[in-house]
Image (cartoon, rainbow, N blue to C red):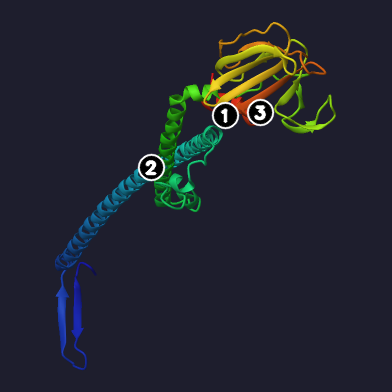
Amino acid sequence: MFKKGYKIIVIKDDQFDLKEFYLTPIKIPILFTFLLVPFILFYFILSSFNSSSISNQSTLVKSQLLEIDSLKSQNKMQSEKLMTYEMTIEDNIRQNKKTLDNLDKKLVINQTKSDQIVKTLFKTQALPREVRKVGSGGESSSKKSEKLDNSSLNKLYDQSKLLSHEINNIQKKINLENIYLNNIEDKFYSNIDYWLSIPSRMPLDIKRGIYISSYYGYREDPLHKKNQFHSGDDFSADTGTPVKSTAEGVVLKAEYNHRLGNFVEIDHGYGYKTLYGHMVDGLSVKKGDKVTRGQTLGGVGSTGRSTAAHLHYEVKYDNKTENPRKFYTYDKKLEKLLHFP
């Protein structure tokens, strides 16, 4: 059948017109080739286009992935830098807080010291608060900094700035206090002879068994049993306990009388005098001797008008007796505040 060929009949719709086509065995492969070749070509063209498109898309995806990786890497570096910067700021804040605490302590020490010196030595008020507020800048920034949130880098930076500002304010106050303290010390040391001449210690080294048995002021006289004025303090102590000068000066008297027994009177200058009575025989100083603060004058005794071993001690200013207890505290305060020798 194939060898004889094929007959193709074409009938037009609604017409009786017929057309016949006869395909011989030789024409059939030619027809198939004519129909198949365009299809194959179209297929290859389409395949090539799809392959190229896929390749381009793959290249684009790879490029975008590389860009994403690069952005991730940059973001990681930026994050690490931010973390490092944040840690640096936090470290600065810790250091600033530590510095601020130290400066606060130093300021308090300086203010306390200057106040004590002024009140003790010059009997005047301390540096006014209004003066100490110079350069303070109003409300303390340390209080403001407590309200800041450390989770924000900007707020950390603000906190660091506020602490630095507070440190500068405290430093200004310390500088002012140092100037004030230096002026006080200059005034003190420029008048060192005056301070050395003020009775500024007890006449005995106080220890167990030594105490004040009778104070300055009115009391009942132990011999006459009458209420009389007592012009000094009486120190009860064992016989021979060293009696010491309470300030620098020159011995005015070193002698005996029936009331005070063996006594020493010292002129310290600047209107101050001290008297030490009822001492044992054999005084350690004589009239005209220069004595230093703490120098031994003799020993506790019971000479003169006395009922037991004790020391009668008087302080005079412009030849009028003063309460000795006003001067006992000077000794330790001077040594503590100004390293007084």
Q: Quadrant of residue 85?
A: top left
Of mark 3 and mark 1, the one earlier in the sequence is 1
Q: Is residue 171 left or right of residue 336?
A: left
Q: Residue drawn at (66%, 22%), measured in percent from left and top?
A: 202
Q: Disc 2 to disc 3, how far (Cα)? A: 66 Å
Task: Give the residue type that dot 1 points to.
Answer: Asp
Left-right relation of 257 to 122:
right
Q: Give percent across and percent down for residue 148.
A: 47, 52
What mark, if any, has residue 33 been given in the picture?
A: none
Pointer 1: what residue? 318
From the top left corner, tell me how far across and down residue 244 is, in percent. Answer: 64, 15
- Badge 2 crowding class, 10 Å Cα cut-off, few under 14, some 14 to 19, many 20 or more, is some
Residue wearing tag 2: 85
* Count of numbered marks: 3
Separation of residues labelled 3 and 1 (CA atoms): 14 Å
Location of residue 296 in the rendering, given as x and y in whole percent from the top left corner: 64, 11
Neighbourhood count class around disc 3 (C-alpha, 10 Å): few under 14, some 14–19, many 20 upward: many
**Residue under the image location 36 percent in, 42 percent down:** 81
Residue toward you, 209 or 177? 209
Examine the rendered structure and indicate whether residue 283 appears above or below residue 211: above
Residue found farthest to the top: 282
Amino acid on which disc 2 is placed: Tyr
| C-beta proximity under 8 Å, tags 3 and 1 | no
Q: Amino acid at mark 3?
A: Pro
In space, the residues marked 2 and 1 are separated at their CA atoms by 72 Å
Of discs 2 and 3, which sits in the foreground? 3
Vertical placement of residue 318 versus 26, above or below: above
Q: Nearer the viewer, residue 8 or 147?
A: 147
Name the residue tied to disc 3.
Answer: 324
Whether residue 184 appears in this view of the structure is yes
In front of the other: 165 or 117:
117
Mark 3 or 1, which is nearer the eye?
A: 1
